[in-house]
Amino acid sequence: MPGFEIFGDEERKEVMDVIETGVLFRYGFEGARKGRWKARSFEEELTERLGAGYCHLCSSGTAALSIALAACGIGAGDEVIVPPFTFVATVESVLTAGAVPVFAEIDETLCLDPDRIEDKFSERTRAVIPVHMCGAMARIDAIVEICRSRKLVLIEDACQSLGAAYRGKAAGTFGHMGCFSFDPVKTVTCGEGGAVVTDDAALYRAADSFADHGHDHIGNDRGKERHPILGTNFRISELNAAVGLAQLRKLDRILEIQRRHRDRLKEALARFSGIRFRRIPDESGDSATFLSFLLPDEDSARKTAAAFNDAGVDGCFYWYDNNWHYLRQWEHLKRLQCAARLPAAEFDHCPDYSAVDLPQSDSVMARTISMQIKLGWTEEDLDRRCEAMERVLRELVG
Ligand SMILES: *Cc1c(COP(=O)(O)O)cnc(C)c1O
């Protein structure tokens, strides 16, 4: 799954390019940088790879979400539909924008269920953020249709799904903006980094300015630049961008390995009638960072996850019980524990997050196990893994 498994000379060379010039800033210093623009090159190559119109590289996936929300004009009091199964950053970015996250059901895609989004609409609903979890996509065509007909902003959180696609079109390119993360455990990593992509020139300009104190980035004298809007600092450094550039060039290789390893594991699991695989709207577009599957019920899922770990089948996540990716365990959110007064808490329409009831999502998550796909597995590792899984499942699932 993570690109850090295949660091090599390519990353080293790109980083040394930057060290040699001493220019760690992504803007300016034209004389000293000897034509080396790592952030800019990363943006160009990612734009090309995704078939997007524009890309702005930034300091993290969380920053990308904040930038996208700001650029799309989502702010104080606006309601934003989000799924309960995501990394908490999706929710945090809505809250820090001053907006109100509203949770809607997921389905067996492990992503927002388009048929249940409208349950959560109010006159304040302004945006929808589907999260393409664990390497594969939501039923994005239906979500696009809903947002179009309701004139809602659509921001895709594709932080976990670089390389995923639906009918040949890249995850992150369906909405007004798409967000990516290159944090240390993502498919492509640059240490810390993120990106927003869009086809809309005005949204791109707003994002590009917002992420760098409102600078318009016109001309080559930073002191003379104008500031069309107030912004903040979500810049990426050239060092991080350099690592990401080398990693991005390995994406196709990463995807090829992941898909091969997934196929092998999937074949072993498919022999058990008690196991169903996560629904993926376009199987050929699965980036295969994880293999996710559903057991018949909560009890067998919990037992299977534990037995897999005991049997040395590592990297299996039973999200329903862990503190990480599912609303059920987010006590800090349920109590709105914050460092400072939170805008959302001031709105009478902010839901009581401790009382959010999503039975369909609970039912899906209680049965789901996600298995991380490693790049470094050998054929013997895969054989051993399949044997161990089969031993466990023969006993527990049949
Ligand atoms: C990783 C991740 C983020 C945040 O990315 P960072 O670069 O770690 O800030 C946001 N959303 C999802 C779904 C993620 O997995």
Image (spheres, grey):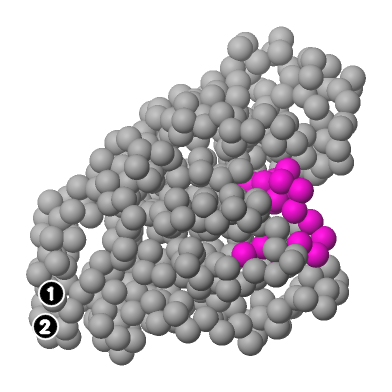
- Amino acid type at circle 1 is Phe
Is there any visible trace of residue 246 in the rendered image? no
Residue furthest toward the front? 149
The quarter holding residue 71 reads top right
Above or below residue 74? Residue 350 is below
Relative side of 212 to 393, left or right: right
Q: Is residue 72 magenta?
A: yes
Above or below residue 111? Residue 349 is below
What's the residue at 45%, 51% (across, down)?
141
Going from N to C along the chain, the mark reached first, 2 or 1, is 1
Residue to which mark 1 is pinned: 272
Q: Where is residue 324 shown, x and y percent of the image?
A: 51, 71
Q: Where is residue 99 shown, x and y percent of the image?
A: 75, 63
Residue to which mark 2 is pinned: 398
What's the residue at 56%, 29% (across, down)?
53
Is there any visible trace of residue 395 in the rendered image? yes
| SS state under label 2 | loop
Above or below residue 23? Residue 294 is below
- Amino acid type at circle 2 is Gly
Q: Are marks 2 and 1 in contact (CB under 8 Å)?
A: yes
Q: Where is residue 384 shown, x and y percent of the image?
A: 12, 63
Relative side of 217 to 291, left or right: right
Numbered range of the magenta stretch: 62-81
Q: Where is residue 103 shown, x and y percent of the image?
A: 60, 72
Q: Residues within 10 Å of mark 2 (few under 14, many from 20)?
A: few
